[in-house]
Image (tube, helix red, strand yellow):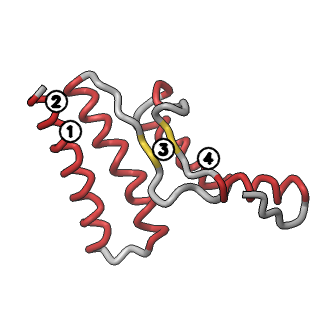
Amino acid sequence: NEQVIEELLNLAKQIQAAQKEGEELGLNADELAFYDALTKPQAIKDFYEKRGEMRGFKAAGGISTAKDAVLYYTIVEQILGNKWLNSEYFRIGASSLANDILTAIEGKEVKYF
């Protein structure tokens, strides 16, 4: 319905404004991705509290290390809660992460993905 579309557009505008703010702060790509990880879940939470509809979170640029995966997991858990910690609502670009974990297991660099 029209109201839902308007709310989604507002959510998109909030996310876009947060990204622009990060760029204006002169953040590099990694810093901007982290800034996005802090601001986007809050916008999603605000939308959920207002509309009662869950929307997913995808880390900008993907997650390339196990350390980053734990950090993003913790951010989503703290801001959005456990309901978002599943493959439907919490998405990561995981090929680099998988390689990082395989490298740690094998003790040598692995480029499987």
**What residue is disc 1 on?**
8
The residue at 46%/37% (across/down) is 78
Q: CA separation, marks 1 and 4?
A: 28 Å
Judged by depth in the image, the label closer to the viewer, 4 or 2, is 2
**What residue is disc 4 on?**
70
Q: CA separation, marks 2 and 3?
A: 26 Å
Crowdedness of circle 3 by 10 Å Cα count: few (<14), some, many (20+)?
some
- Would you say the residues marked 1 and 4 are in contact, meaning their CB atoms lie under 8 Å apart? no
Q: Is residue 4 above or below residue 27?
A: above
Crowdedness of circle 2 by 10 Å Cα count: few (<14), some, many (20+)?
few
Rendered location of residue 13, percent (x, y)? 19, 51
Tag shown at residue 75:
3
- Would you say the residues marked 4 and 3 are in contact, meaning their CB atoms lie under 8 Å apart? no
Describe the element under mark 1 as helix, strand or loop: helix
Q: Is residue 91 above or below residue 94?
A: above
Describe the element under mark 2 as helix, strand or loop: helix
Indicate the quadrant containing the C terminus: top left, top right, bottom left or bottom right.
bottom right
Judged by depth in the image, the label closer to the viewer, 1 or 4, is 1
Judged by depth in the image, the label closer to the viewer, 3 or 1, is 1
Tag shown at residue 4:
2
Crowdedness of circle 1 by 10 Å Cα count: few (<14), some, many (20+)?
some
Rendered location of residue 100, percent (x, y)? 74, 58
Residue type at tag 1: Leu
Q: CA separation, marks 4 and 3?
A: 9 Å
Judged by depth in the image, the label closer to the viewer, 2 or 3, is 2
